[in-house]
Amino acid sequence: MTTLPWLSLIQLGGGLLLLILGAELLVRAAVRLAASLGVRPLLIGLTVVAFGSSAPQLAVSVQAAAAENADIAVGSVIGGNIFNTLVTLGLSALIIPLRVSRQLIRLDIPLMIFASLLVFALAFNEELGRLDGLVMLSAFALYLGLLLRQSRHHHAVPSPPPHKSTPWLSSLVWMGLGLALLVVAGHLLLDAAVDVATELGLSERIIGLTVVAVGTSLPQLATSLIAAVRGQRDIAVGNVIGGNLFNLLGVLGLTALLAPTPLSVSPNALAFDLPVMLGVAMLCWPVFYSGYRITRAEGLLFLGLYLAYGLHVVWFTTGMPMADKLERLMLFFILPALLAYLLFSTLRAWRRQHS
């Protein structure tokens, strides 16, 4: 009884390390392969980097659904998107103010909001079935088609010299190795998370929203931070937005399609977690549009919002009476007031640009 938590924690740590290593191999190989094709940095961030660094999320969610741990499968996606937007973008903006492309404002951010609304609507009956999965995957295919069409209207970046390019076969081998590590890591992480939840008396929803969500988001966090340090701001931002779309439509859609039974969505997730995820997605558009960048002050705002969300999760888990008060404060006062202020800032920015 006393050794199980330690063994589970060691397994959890090993799973997280393998996730990061597998994602690193996958992302590096995929970026080299895409760069040799002369693809724009923003498109690389929205697709290859975002999908590669979100692969741990796919591995964990699919295996959680196969083991009939629906709360982990769904909660990790919701918690991962909240973490990616508030923490990954917030920390990256503290390193360097992030430039936001007009394409993100016109296409990707509205689609991320639409995807959040779609998942919320499909989950309203407290489950996600195979038909819902097909709808989400169809929407994801449409998004990829729009990206492909958008890329044709822009000039490609020059391809690297032949002697510096990586053979495509070698890149594919490294990508395969990265994916294999992710599958093994996903299995270790899932088993450890369920064991820890059982030993500590925590619900699978809380474990999915916190430990698994943060753990599977670490590759995206590391990728965006490294991109910000190197001044690759398009990749830093595109990695998050593309990853969120991939999580909502690709990961959750494929998970719902492959699950042996419909994924159950807890009432708590419908009442709080999904509205917060939707509010965070909606928050991005006015923040990005007001100055076509994310400032350090806005990065601190994002981190502060995640701190409030994390406090609610902890207080709710421990049964503290402050949890309900904080939830009502966030849903009915803080978020509406913040959205109203950002709407005002957006209108002011629009008038300034069209005056």
Image (cartoon, helix red, strand yellow):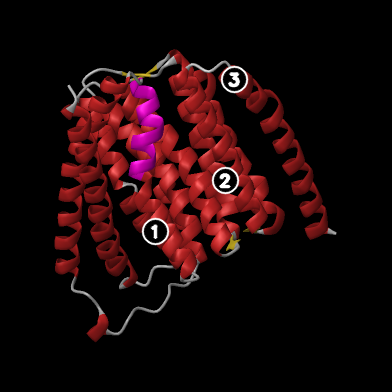
Nearer the viewer's eye, disc 1 or disc 3?
Answer: 3
Residue 302 seen anywhere in this rendered image of the structure: yes
What residue do we see at 64% from left, 46% from top?
A: 301
Q: Position of residue 269 (x, y in %)?
A: 46, 21
Residue type at mark 3: give it. Answer: Met
The residues colored magenta run 203-216
Q: CA distance from mark 2 to mark 3?
A: 21 Å
- Residue at figure coordinates x 28%, y 64% from the top left: 28
Q: Nearer the viewer, residue 321 or 168?
A: 321
Badge 2 crowding class, 10 Å Cα cut-off, few under 14, some 14 to 19, many 20 or more, is many
Give coordinates of residue 127: x percent, y percent: 38, 17
Using the image, determine if residue 183 lies above or below residue 93.
above
Q: CA distance from mark 1 to mark 2?
A: 18 Å
Picture quadrant where residue 191 is located? top left
Placement of 340 over or under 178, stated as above or below: above
Q: Three-letter amino acid code at disc 1?
A: Thr
Dot 3: within a 10 Å radius of its alpha carbon, few (fewer than 14), some, or many (20 or more) residues?
few
| Residue on which disc 2 sits | 303
Report the disc number at residue 223.
Answer: 1
Please tell me how many numbered marks the rendered image carries: 3
Which residue occupies the foreground of this view, 248 or 98?
98
Q: Amino acid at mark 2?
A: Leu
